Amino acid sequence: MRLTSFAILFVIIIAPFLCISGIQSRVLQKDVELRAYYDQVLDNAVQDAVFMLAHQRRQVSGEGGLTIQNTREIAVSHFFDTLFFSFGVYGDETGMMRVKGCVPVIVFLEYDGYIVYALNQYQGSEGYSIMNYCWYPKKPYYGAAESGRYLVAYTLDDTVVIYNTYDGQEMEGQFSDFSALIPQFQTKEGFETARLAAVSQSIEKDLDSHIARFNSFSSRMGVTHTFRFPRIVDADWIRALTDEGMLVFAQGFPVMTGIPYESSAFGGARILGKSQLVGYEREGKAIYCRKSCDHYLSLSSLPDFDQESIVSFTDARDAASQGYYPCDFCRP
């Protein structure tokens, strides 16, 4: 057989394999792009929601205004609306239910505890089974210390509440105040390690039970994916404990090949930061200043001052990003 014949035979044999390999390569590339798109959509939805959460928290009032729970509900609604628009299913009840079925749990990380918003199945007033999201009671960030003698309730800063399980005594203060009782609190690093473990373990234990419950009825929502406990590394927990915010878990979005899609997204609402600046409107101009500014204190006591225009900011960048100008008197 001549060389050209060998070449033709070789091409005939190898061509199908090259074609299949090329198709697989394109499928893998499209799969990577699809997963990246899901990540971007999820991150954008969370960031939009926590921006709304932070904005609404500034409007909270004890006299008939927004409540803390109202702000959570607004943030959740904003989160899902962003997802629905991104996936082109807004207004399509079936499509929206399928998207919701991929996000079974949302966690609100707050200063002294966390609140879970999760899908659940329960009996309606007429005896029918209802599948919908439920708000669960707020739980503290608990951790045990000194072989169980002390139960520590952590916060998102250095404040702790110590419960003595032997005599029922309760103490509150900075972690350093209790360094004689709890050796880990003798250093900042030891305290941060203990706090990280307490927060992550508290939430992870709760998430495990919620996901197991969801798997028991998820098929009725058109979800064929079996959810598993999300992987959250310490670096993500450390980032999550910087501010109050939302932690969202998504699994089961359709992919082209490989392992099922799973992701988590955190958005910090910058609510925790101690607000040292205030903003107000005067003569059509939005101004921010220090809370102790004499000019501001003088203006705020006048009868024509618009008290409803007062807002709080964590720093000058936060104020400037919302169109406020620095005060000419205190120069914050």
Image (cartoon, rainbow, N blue to C red):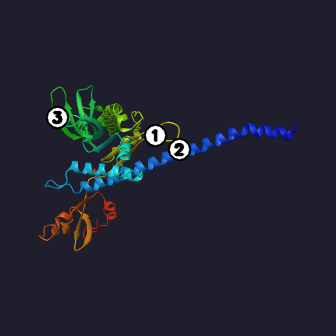
Q: CA distance from mark 3 to mark 2?
A: 54 Å
The numbered disc on residue 170 is 3
- In the image shown, does 93 or 196 lie closer to the viewer? 93
- In the image shown, does 187 or 62 lie closer to the viewer? 62
Which marked residue is nearer to the observer: mark 1 or mark 3?
1
Q: Give the answer, above or below, for where 124 lies relative to 271.
A: above
Residue that extends furthest to the left in the rendered view of this protein = 303
Res. 24 image quadrant = top right
Q: Position of residue 130 (x, y in %)?
A: 27, 37
Residue that extends furthest to the bottom in the rendered view of this protein = 283
Q: Position of residue 315 (x, y in %)?
A: 31, 59
Residue 239 appears in the figure:
no
Q: Give the answer, above or below, for where 226 lies relative to 243.
A: above
Q: Quadrant of the C terminus?
A: bottom left
> Mark 3: few, some, or many residues within 10 Å (few <14, many ≥20)?
few
Residue located 18% across and 25% down the image: 166
Q: Report which residue position mark 1 lands on.
A: 261
Q: Is residue 77 left or right of residue 166?
A: right
Q: How many marks?
A: 3
Which marked residue is nearer to the observer: mark 3 or mark 2?
2
